[in-house]
Image: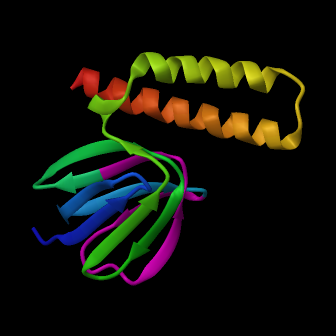
């Protein structure tokens, strides 16, 4: 099967570099998929799970929001954070979920509310991605 060069970068590290057969990521309008030979484009990625197919096997990673630059032969993803399921601390993610839910219940400024919503979304993605790895 044909492939494209996939690079996933965070401020701390190169999260992934290699050949991929497909990439599916969340956007505000729903899931977006990339295959080899895709038309050039820049897309905004929403907080959620990245699904990467490598050698016929699909892996998921929890990802923050960011940008995806797509070229026919390569794709570059730039995010604040990315984690493989085995790297997620489920206890810490659960604590972050509870703290964000509590913050949302309290009266706060619009900025604090938006931040709490973002923290809750990130915790929920991390928990879902980590849970899926336990089932496999």
Q: Is residue 6 above or below residue 15?
A: below
Residue 68 visible in the current orientation = yes
Indicate left or right for 121 with 48 as reference. Answer: right
**Which residue is at the front of the view, 83 or 23?**
83
Q: Residue at x 69, y 36 (%)?
A: 117
Quadrant of the rendered structure where residue 99 is?
top right
In the image, residue 50 lies in the stretch drawn in magenta: yes
Q: Position of residue 45 (x, y in %)?
A: 51, 59
Q: Which residues are magenta?
A: 29-51
- Left/right placement of residue 38 relative to residue 3 reads right
In the image, what residue occupies the spot 53% across and 30% down?
Answer: 123
Task: State which quarter of the image contains the N terminus.
Answer: bottom left
Residue at position x 33%, y 78% from top? 38
Q: Position of residue 51 (x, y in %)?
A: 32, 50
Q: Position of residue 83 (x, y in %)?
A: 36, 40
- Residue at the image position 85 percent from the left and 21 percent from the top: 106
């Amino acid at each position: 099967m044909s492939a494209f060069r996939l690079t996933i970068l965070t401020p701390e590290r190169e999260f992934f570099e290699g050949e991929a057969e497909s990439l599916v990521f969340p956007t505000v309008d729903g899931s977006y998929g990339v295959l080899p030979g895709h038309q050039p484009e820049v897309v905004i990625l929403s907080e959620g799970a990245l699904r990467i197919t490598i050698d016929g096997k699909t892996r998921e990673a929890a990802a923050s929001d960011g940008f995806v630059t797509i070229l026919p032969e390569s794709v570059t993803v730039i995010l604040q954070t990315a984690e493989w399921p085995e790297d997620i601390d489920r206890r810490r993610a659960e604590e972050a979920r509870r703290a964000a839910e509590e913050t949302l219940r309290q009266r706060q400024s619009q900025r604090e509310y938006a931040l709490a919503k973002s923290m809750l979304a990130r915790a929920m993605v991390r928990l879902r991605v980590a849970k899926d790895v336990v089932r496999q």
